[in-house]
Amino acid sequence: MTPPAHPATAPGPADPDGPDPDGPGPDGAVAARGPRGARPPSAVVVGGGLAGITAALALADRGIGVTLVEARPRLGGLAFSFRRATSLGELTVDNGQHVYLRCCTAYRAFLRRIGGAGLAPLQRRLDVPVLDAARGRLGRLRRTALPVPLHLAPGLARYPHLTPGERLAVARAALALRRLDPADPALDAQDFAGWLRRHGQSDRCVEALWDLVGVATLNARAADASLALAAMVFRTGLLTEPGAADIGIPRVPLGTLHHTLARGALARAGVEVLTATRARGVRRDASGGGWRVTVAGRTGLPARELAADSVVLAAPQRETHRLLPPGALPEPGRLLRIETAPILNVHVIYDRPVLRRGFFAALGSPVQWVFDRTAPSGLDGRRHQYLVLSQSAAHEEIGLPTGVLRERYLPELARLLPAARAARVCDAFVTRERAATFAPAPGVGRLRPGPVTRAPGLYLAGAWTATGWPATMEGAVRSGLAAARAAAGHRTTAKETA
C-alpha cells in the first residue's frame, strides 16, 4: 500500500529547520522545548505513527515536555491519506482501508482524545455481508444481544456458506479456542491451521470463517499465523463480550484523524512536533544523566542534537534496530528477524453507484474485502462510486504491475457486482505497503521486545513490540501507552534518587 504521494501538511508549532530561539547548549545540543518553553527537556519520541503520537500525548499528560520527531512530512505512520489527481478532479485517498472493533478500547480512547470518536462510528451490532462468488449467494455474519457465546449462535445457524455439520464443528472449535491462553508460549510456536485441523475444521470452514476474519485482522492465513495471536484475536473479538467485534469504519479520510486532529491534540498538549525531520542517532549524554538524539531536516541543512531525559523509539523494527545504542537489548538482532507482511489495495472509481452497502467480504474469489469510500474521498456519490479492494497477505501480488492487477480485479468486481457490468471505470489505481505489518508467524512472540530496554531512559513502542496484539491500530496505541508509563516511571524514580 505504498502511496504515490502524501497529504499536504499543516505548519506545526515550530519550524524544525529554522533558527532556535533558545539556541544550542554549551556543548552544541539544542534543548527540546516542552510546554511554555520548560527546561530542561524531558522526552523525545522518535516516530509519528499511532504509537509515537500516543506516547507523546501520554507523556505530556504527565507534565513531561515532549518533542516528537517524524521523518515524513505528515503524521499517522502507515494509516494515512494523500491527494490524487483523477479524471474527476483531485480526491483524498487513504493508503489502505483501516477499520477497528469495539474491543479496541485503547484506539477508541485515542479517538476520543483527539476529538475524532464521532468520525469513526461503530456498528450498532456486528453485521458482515459475505458474498459467495461461486454460488452467487449472500450470507451474513451477525450477532445478537445474548450472552457470550450464545450471541453468535443464531447468526451461525443461518450462515449459508457452511453445512449444518460444518456449523456444529465451528461451534465446537470456538468453545475449544475459548479455553486457550494466548499468553502461553507453547501456543506461539504452533500454527493456527494445524490447530484447526485437529479440531475438525474443513477447508471450507477455514475459508468461509476462520480465514475470512483472520486474514483481515492478522494479515496472514491460518497456516502462516501463530496460534497464540489467532487465539487472542478470536477470543477477544468473538468470545469475550457480545459487542466486542462490532466494526468501526472512519467516515472521513485517515489523514483527518491521524494527522490533522492528532496534530491539533499534540499542539494543545504542548508537544513540539518536528515533521520532515529524521533521527540520525541516539546516544547517552556524556554526563550519563540523559540522552542526545541527532536529527536532520531538509537536505543541505546541518544536523543538530536534541537533549532529553528519556527517549521513546516508536519507529518500525528495522529503523529501531539502526538507532539502538549498544547494549540496549540483549539480542538486538531479534528485531531483524521479525518479518513483515504486505497489504495491497485496488482503488476503482465507477461512473455510477454499483454497491448499495458500505462493505462486504467475498468467498470463492481473489477479492477479499470491498469498501465504499466515495464520501470520504470527496466524490459526488449521486453520480459516481469509489470502491477499495483490500487484499491482505498479498505476498504473491504485491510486486505485480498495476495493469496486471486491473486485468485480474476489474472483471472480478463485475462478476461479484452485477451493476458494475454496465458501469464505466473512470479510474483504477493501486496502493501498496510491502511492509504493512509484522508477520504474525509462529515463533514471533519470542522476538517481540517489551517497552523497557537495558538502557535507563530508553523505551520502545510500535505495533511490533510485545503488546499481545497483532499488528493493528489497537496494538500500536497500546504500545505507546506502555512506553509512556515506563518512561514516566523512570523519570519519577530518577527524581526520587536525586
Image (tube, helix red, strand yellow):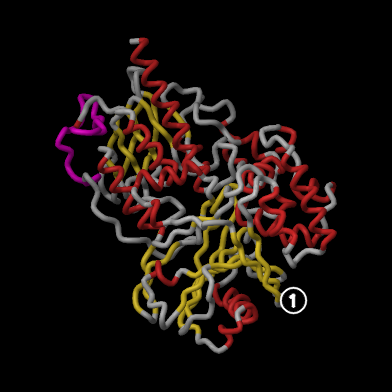
Looking at the picture, does residue 491 appear above or below residue 362? above
Name the residue beneath numbered marker 1: 135
Residue placed most toward the observer, 310 or 386: 386
Residue drawn where x is 39% and y is 81% of the image? 87
- Please provide the residue range marked out in magenta: 15-36
Q: In which quarter of the image is residue 496?
A: top left
Q: In this orientation, does residue 476 appear?
A: yes
Residue 35 highlighted magenta (yes or no): yes
Q: Residues within 10 Å of mark 1 (few under 14, many from 20)?
A: few
Residue drawn where x is 68% and y is 37% of the image? 182
Is the magenta region chiefly helix, strand or loop? loop
Give left or right: position of 258 versus 217.
left
Q: Quadrant of residue 254?
A: bottom left
Residue 486 highlighted magenta (yes or no): no
Give left or right: position of 340 versus 490.
right
Q: Where is residue 91 in the image (x, y as percent from the top left)?
A: 37, 71
Q: Residue furthest front?
A: 146
Q: Where is residue 461 in the image (x, y as percent from the top left)?
A: 47, 37
Q: Position of residue 465 (x, y in %)?
A: 54, 37
Looking at the picture, does residue 377 appear above or below residue 216? below
